[in-house]
Image (cartoon, rainbow, N blue to C red):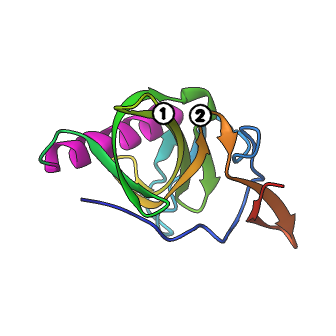
Amino acid sequence: MFLCSRAISAFAGEPPEHPEHPKKSPATQPSGQTKGAEKKEVTTAQISTGIKKHITDETKKSSDGKFHAKHEGKDLALDLVKVHDDRLSGLGGGKYFACVDMKAADGTVYDIDFFLSGTPDDMKVTETSIHKVNGKALYGWKEEGGVWKKVPVS
């Protein structure tokens, strides 16, 4: 079971929206290949495929067929509702952002932010964070010296 309980404290690159997630970038971003190698472009469709693959893989690993995440010390068993394809972003440097909605058995909807890295054929989730619960934001973003940091909502 993949769980990333570590909070994302900072990242360089595009400022957030959703309304606080990373700004949308052009449809493609360099994948960060080495000099001299042909650069592969990563499309938003490939980011969508990457996050869906991650969720499917993690769901298959669980005994109950659910995606599991931790929130406030509780293990959440979730089903995918929607990948926000309009909010997928390339952040540069082979890093990407995806946002999904997932639902618990009690009807609670969790908006979950995922950060990924890698190539179009091999994307890995590096950070996972529950951003909203039933539409209520748990954190926002603030830029400090060109680096975006999570900040508590007041």
Nearer the observer, 109 or 149: 109
Residue 95 versus residue 107 in the image, above or below = below
Which residue does the numbered mark 1 point to in the structure image?
A: 108
Q: Which residue is mark 2?
A: 134
Disc 1 + disc 2, Cβ < 8 Å? yes
Judge from the rendering whether residue 146 lies leftward or rightward of residue 46; answer left or right. Answer: right
The magenta region covers 44-62
Residue 53 at x, y percent in the picture = 30, 41
Residue 136 lies in quadrant: top right
Residue in the picture at 56% in, 48% down: 97
Q: Residue 25: horizontal and vertical position, in percent?
A: 69, 41
Around disc 1, counting alpha carbons within 10 Å, would you say few (fewer than 14), some (14 to 19), or many (20 or more)?
few
Percent position (x, y) of residue 74?
39, 58
Q: Is residue 46 located in the magenta-colored stretch of the structure? A: yes
Membership of 131 in magenta stretch: no
The residue located at (58%, 62%) in the rendering is: 93
Q: Secondary structure at mark 1?
A: loop
The quadrant of the picture occupied by the N terminus is bottom left
Q: What amino acid type should be assigned to the residue bearing mark 1?
A: Thr
- Tell me the number on the disc at residue 59: none
**Visible residue check, residue 25:** no
For marks 1 and 2, give the CA distance. 6 Å
Viewer-proximal residue among 4 and 119 = 4
Q: Quadrant of the C terminus?
A: bottom right
- Disc 2 on helix, strand or loop? loop
The residue positioned 61% from the left and 43% from the top of the image is: 132
Relative to 142, 72 lies left or right: left
At label 2, which amino acid type do we have?
Answer: Asn
At x 44%, y 28%, the residue is: 107
Q: Main secondary structure of the magenta part?
A: helix
Which residue ends up furthest to the right in the rendered image?
145
Q: Residue 76: where, in percent of width, then height? A: 36, 48
